[in-house]
Image (spheres, grey):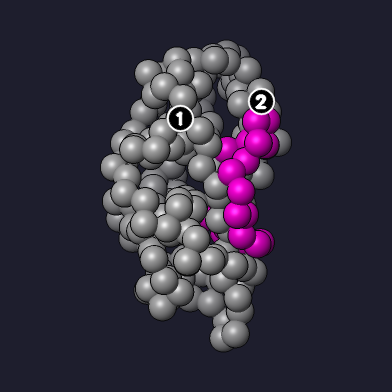
Amino acid sequence: MRCRGAFDASSLVVAIVLAPCLSACARSTPPKAGDGDASGISSAAVGSKTCEPQTLGLGDAKPVALWKAPEGCTPKVRGSAPVVVRSEADLSAYYTCPAGVPLGVDFKAHALVLSARMLPPAGVGTSIVDDGATVTFISRQRKNCANDPRPMPMTVVHAFLLPAGAARTFGDATCTVESTCN
């Protein structure tokens, strides 16, 4: 291994492989502490408080409830601006799914937010938190190491639920996790 960071490498691999697919079922309740985040890496696995919402000046922002598309559904989300989807008919503009597959979103109770983002070269995950007014994408990064492979552009689609009718602005924050290069 050329670069070791303060994160669980197996979780990172799972996050990179699974995040673009977003396949499984919907989650209708916010994740509990220690459940992980949008990247699949738990706060404990990162091993540092530098990326916590309070440390980044985001107050008491809490993790959003993630949504995973059903198996067989393919995202067709473009751009990085978050898109708020308020109906199953609108969702068809952003996902292609086999006929008759239930999407698992109760649009009477929730809006679905989709955001396609490019993974940074030294990224180790993304957390998404909501303080009731602003949803913030927290990008966790490590230092580049001299012998790192060249970065390859990869897009990940973040999908999460907000209460139906909720008005939010969107923001970004970045933090650096400790890493050691060999």
Q: In whole angstroms, how far apart are the C-alphas of marks 2 and 1?
A: 19 Å
Question: What is the number of callouts on the image?
Answer: 2
Which kind of residue does numbered mark 1 sit on?
A: Ala
As displayed, is residue 101 above or below residue 69?
Answer: below
- Position of 109 with respect to 86 (left or right) is right
Q: Is residue 22 magenta?
A: yes
Residue found at x 39% / y 24%: 58
Which kind of residue does numbered mark 2 sit on?
A: Ala
Report the residue marked by disc 1. 61
- What x and y, as percent, mark residue 35? 67, 36
Residue 100 is marked as none
First along the sequence among labels 2 and 1: 2
Q: Is residue 26 magenta?
A: yes
Report the residue marked by disc 2. 45
SS at circle 2:
helix
Q: Quadrant of residue 40?
A: top right
